[in-house]
Image: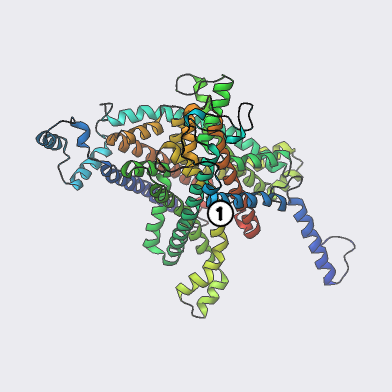
Amino acid sequence: MSTAPDTSTTTDADMDEDRESDAALFEKYRPRKFHLHSPLTLGFPIGVMILFVITGVFGPALAPYDATEIDLINRLAETGFQSNGSWDHALGTDDLGRDVLSRLLNGARLSLFIVVVIIPLSTLIGALVGLFAAWIGGWTSRLLMGLVDLQMALPGILLAVLFASIFGPSLRNVVIVLVIFLWSSQARIVRSEALALSETDFVLAARTIGSTDARIMFRHILPNLLNTIVILATLNVATVIIAEAGLSYLGVGVDQQTISWGKMISEGRDVLSIAWWLVTIPGIAIITVSLAGNLFGDWLRDALDPRLRHAR
Amino acid sequence: MTSKLWAAIVMRFMRAILTIFVVITLVFFLSRAIGDPVSFYAPIDSTQEEIDFLKNKLGFDRPLIVQYGDFLYKAVQLDFGKSFTASRPAWDVVTERLQATVELGVSALIIGIVIGIPLGVVAAVRRGGIVDFSSRVIALLGQAVPNFWLGLILIFLVSVKLGWLPTGGRGDFQQLILPAVTLGTFPAAAIMRFTRSSMLEALQQDYIRTARSKGLTQRVVIMKHALRNSLLPVVTLMGLQVAGILSGSIIIETVFAWPGLGRLIIQAIIGTDFNIIQAAVFMTTIWIVFANLIVDISYMFLDPRIRTGGGSV
């Protein structure tokens, strides 16, 4: 067991020695000089998330101006941080003179709404389909997994563009397309994890005492999958926000009246060379929230389920 | 066990064909839902008789299921009809545009490989070091930055401010650089993360210890023993990146006015050019499905554990 010369004959000492070598091994493979997931870095994602929720809920009330108010005299005003800017419009104005800060705060509401609607919906569908496919097996399972494969072959963005051209751009389309796009990854992972779990001893034990399939699925397997499901849902927050921005940028996302960070970028595109902040600022908002979502998801993964560490 | 392997390959191939069939069916019915195709042939002031005549002539008056059967029969022969806007065979337009997308996509993948693999190797070998840390930060950022935004920022900085490269279009090599870099960032981050974790796993194997105890240099151990064994999952990832690059190219081609398949699809949908939509989606699907197919099959051949039927295929 241990080769150290001073190992005493008692088993206690042997175990101590073991513990030491475990600790040494842990030390050896611990990330050394830099830490990405220390308690300090956890503060950033949590802080951003709280800020995101607050601006999402109270955004329009916090906004200094009406986000749709056109003011052609003050169009393309620079931000308060630039030499020609004023703090009246802290983040400047767009090419119609609308206040960028107010639009940003309003846009947060849409992003929050999309996250709050799409993540639970796609997670629920994905988890249920995955569990069901693992439980039922056979042709039904193959059919369901065939649907998942199909999802991989038809890029979500293509589906979104088709949908938008049929029904016109709308928030509803964005929700439908992103739910369709996201449930499949959940379903695939939940199914394979559920299948792996159904081979374990505790499931065999439950089966031996006469538990029904449904009871095994929902009382024994599902609770063991909750960590995985929550982690994937958290990591999907960034995906949802970036995807909505991309669709709205292409003009196949939300409708004309809705304020979205992606649409702010697309509106700023034409005046990029004279007013770079119109593109830059909403982009930074998207990056900050996505980064926070991913960091929090990574942290959750490391904390809850080390097996998933290499999954992504 | 070879017959089992061949059976698995045939099954996998059938599944690929089935997937293409389902996608093309979906696209046929979805694109018919966009609007009445006759309205694009007939002048605005045409009478009902003229419209009916056109409908009859073009076959749009037949039951949808017959139209669908006819469509499938022609699709197998790569005949998707004429483009409404270009009045040339849709398949020709699509193949022409494909070259531009392949050029962009391959460049992006090369950038991803050239940046991703070395960084991943260094990050794994010097775990916890500065390269590991910064490459993880870059990978995290790569997953948080919308690619179209990055493209716009690059246009602003490199083209508008510095004037080094053109803002868009296709022609000379300089016009390729910015879109390829933009499209290549995500694959680079993904390949890097994957190489890193795959290398870390390989470095802990017994054969690495054996190689080290034989007295081989660090360089040989890493390049010949660890890297070679950890590249298999990375190859898989590259196949999966094809789908990512193709869907990424739709938006990046729009940002940089790159005349490829992605931009063609967007234009065709705006202009309701059915035949182009169908041909282009067919082409995209074939690429993605066959990339996945090749990955799966090469995996079966490359991994002896799968080849000899050690586990379930």
Which residue matches tag 1? A234
Farthest residue, direction left:
B49
Horizontal arrangement in the rendering, residue B5 relative to residue A7 (left or right): left
| Residue in front for this viewpoint, B292 or B84 | B84
Q: Write down the quadrant of residue B68 in the picture.
A: top left
In terms of depth relative to the viewer, which is nearer, A151 or B208? A151
Q: Position of residue A101 (x, y in %)?
A: 55, 39
Q: Is A275 drawn above or below residue A203 in the view shown?
A: above
| Tag 1: amino acid | Thr
Percent position (x, y) of residue A40?
A: 72, 51
* Camera sees residue A1: no
Q: Chain of mark 1?
A: A
Quarter of the rendering containing residue B31: top left
Front residue of B212/B91: it is B91
Q: Position of residue B313 (x, y in %)?
A: 47, 54
Please say whether residue A133 is visible from this viewpoint: yes
Q: Position of residue B170 (x, y in %)?
A: 45, 22
Rendered residue at 43%/53% (across/down):
B4
The residue positioned 64% from the left and 57% from the top of the image is: A306
